[in-house]
């Protein structure tokens, strides 16, 4: 469809930058006002859309045919640009996100870009494949340029972008990795229980005269980051687009059929012969692939298409589970590249992010390891209580010894008080209680010295258990310390209670 009202083009034939919108119901084109970051005309960048609100365009090339100033330069050549262009369809506004974490150069052209809306808080983008080069480095990126391995972004190097946090993560994939390719397409579907996500990849093209060029369908299953080939045929195609149709079909639209495995066409580079698209699988330029049965078809039944996606045995045989999910392989073979990426996918903590061994393909992963973070070893409540009681007993013995030495010294240097004053001495026996709370270490007794060095003012020692534990402090009494003659072991929850003890002189008087 071409805009109904085209403005006159400048003499160089390059129209000014603009955003066009097509109203399907009205059948009309319009040019809405957009705000935010400025945009430039790019091409060959992969793109995707999350829901009905946000669209993403990744990388791309800047061409002299799309920019008046660039076109006026001497011998201009296209060059790659960095950036993830985000379009908020509700606000009609653009923003440009840095892509330095995407890959070595932060650029990509003709690669694969897929979104998984149910991961993270706002969804994630998954990117791989295509070619890359240093920003602003002139290049033609013609068909023969694809033989330069330095510009190829390998299919095993996967990059994940967390939309909510703006974070980039790189992860290595394993399995039956497809040969490097560009200009293919992909769709993603989720198991019913969301234990795995399958990114279906079809078509694309690689180096010229390569026997690895194929028409297979591959699946990148996540979070195990395992490549699986699910079909084997020669349905060569590139520059097409893929869409999820219903819940379980991949619709392939358009594209070009290569002349042969030696050249991408549509006109043979070496022979000049035009390639006609007479493949019956793509009648009228449309191809339909059943994700439930892994077969190509020329018909689509919307009733069948509305049925839930079922994980095919060719996938569940590798990651475990069944048609509705229940995947047991939840880690990449070499572990996640970071704990943050692991947490983003919502799987349990692994022992190592670099050398963690992968369980066998058909083995069952321990559910505790897969679904809960690694527990940290800690002391139990009983152990803490035992330590607290031991510290309390040790403190009691130490204080008793200090009291005994000072009491004996005082008795040695001072005459015995008259019998009439014995009761006064007994009445002034000090009372003490040691509060034992379980989570703090012992504190040294605090002595407040006055004019008489022999007298002890107060002794309190606390071992805190928790904020919720009440503290019961008894006010100290003045006077001398009495020698304990017995210990009452009355149990108070969370405390060791030392009862008030009589003085030996009091016991003599009673006799």
Image (tube, helix red, strand yellow):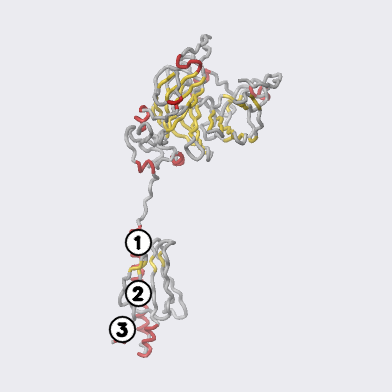
Residue 366 falls in which quadrant of the image?
top left
Residue 367 placed where, x, y %? 35, 41
Q: Residue at x 58, y 32 (%)?
A: 85
Q: CA distance from mark 3 to mark 1?
A: 36 Å
Asked which secondary structure carries label 2, the reply is: loop
Task: Point out the image quarter for the N terminus.
Answer: top right
Residue 421 falls in which quadrant of the image?
bottom left
**Foreground residue, 431 or 36?**
36
Q: From the image, tell me which residue sits under label 2.
A: 499
Q: From the image, tell me which residue sits under label 1.
A: 385
Asked if residue 38 lies left or right of residue 275, the reply is right
Q: Give residue 507's mark.
A: 3
Q: Is residue 434 above or below residue 357?
A: below
**Foreground residue, 86 or 141?**
86
Q: CA distance from mark 1 to mark 2?
A: 21 Å
Asked if residue 399 lies left or right of residue 255, the reply is left
Residue 150 visible in the picture: no
Q: Earlier in the sequence, mark 3 or mark 1?
A: 1
């Amino acid at each position: 469809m071409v805009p109904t009202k085209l403005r006159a083009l400048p003499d160089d034939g390059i129209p000014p930058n603009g955003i066009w919108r097509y109203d399907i119901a009205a059948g009309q084109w319009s040019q809405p006002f957009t705000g935010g970051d400025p945009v430039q005309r790019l091409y060959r960048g992969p793109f995707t859309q999350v829901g009905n609100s946000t669209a993403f365009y990744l990388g791309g090339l800047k061409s002299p045919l799309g920019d008046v100033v660039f076109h006026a330069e001497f011998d201009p050549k296209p060059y790659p640009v960095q950036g993830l262009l985000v379009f908020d369809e509700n606000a009609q506004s653009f923003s440009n996100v840095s892509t330095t974490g995407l890959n070595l150069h932060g650029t990509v052209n003709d690669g694969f870009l897929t979104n998984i809306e149910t991961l993270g808080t706002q969804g994630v983008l998954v990117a791989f494949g295509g070619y890359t080069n240093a920003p602003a480095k002139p290049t033609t990126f013609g068909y023969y340029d694809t033989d330069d391995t330095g510009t190829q972004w390998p299919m095993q190097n996967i990059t994940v972008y967390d939309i909510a946090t703006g974070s980039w993560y790189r992860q290595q994939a394993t399995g039956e990795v497809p040969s490097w390719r560009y200009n293919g397409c992909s769709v993603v579907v989720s198991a019913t229980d969301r234990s795995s996500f399958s990114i279906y990849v079809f078509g694309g093209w690689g180096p010229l005269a390569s026997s690895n060029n194929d028409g297979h369908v591959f699946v990148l299953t996540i979070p195990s980051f395992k490549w699986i080939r699910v079909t084997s045929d020669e349905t060569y195609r590139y520059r097409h687009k893929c869409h999820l149709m219903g819940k379980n079909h991949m619709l392939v639209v358009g594209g070009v059929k290569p002349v042969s495995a030696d050249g991408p066409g549509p006109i043979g580079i070496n022979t000049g012969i035009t390639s006609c698209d007479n493949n019956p699988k793509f009648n009228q330029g449309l191809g339909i692939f059943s994700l439930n049965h892994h077969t190509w078809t020329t018909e689509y039944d919307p009733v069948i298409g509305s049925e839930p996606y079922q994980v095919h045995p060719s996938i569940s045989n590798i990651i475990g589970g069944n048609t509705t999910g229940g995947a047991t392989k939840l880690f990449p073979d070499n572990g996640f590249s970071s704990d943050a990426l692991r947490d983003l996918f919502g799987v349990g903590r692994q022992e190592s992010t670099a050398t963690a061994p992968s369980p066998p393909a058909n083995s069952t992963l321990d559910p505790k390891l897969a679904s809960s973070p690694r527990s940290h070893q800690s002391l139990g409540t009983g152990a803490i209580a035992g330590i607290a009681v031991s510290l309390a007993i040790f403190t009691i013995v130490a204080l008793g010894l200090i009291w005994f030495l000072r009491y004996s010294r005082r008795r040695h240097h001072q005459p015995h008080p008259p019998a009439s004053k014995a009761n006064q001495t007994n009445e002034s026996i000090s009372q003490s209680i040691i509060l034992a709370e379980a989570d703090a270490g012992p504190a040294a007794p605090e002595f407040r010295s006055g004019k008489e060095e022999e007298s002890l003012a107060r002794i309190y020692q606390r071992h805190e258990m928790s904020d919720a534990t009440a503290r019961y402090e008894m006010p100290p009494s003045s006077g001398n310390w009495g020698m304990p003659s017995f210990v009452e072991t009355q149990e108070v929850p969370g405390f060791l209670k030392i009862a008030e003890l009589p003085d030996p002189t009091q016991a003599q008087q009673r006799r």
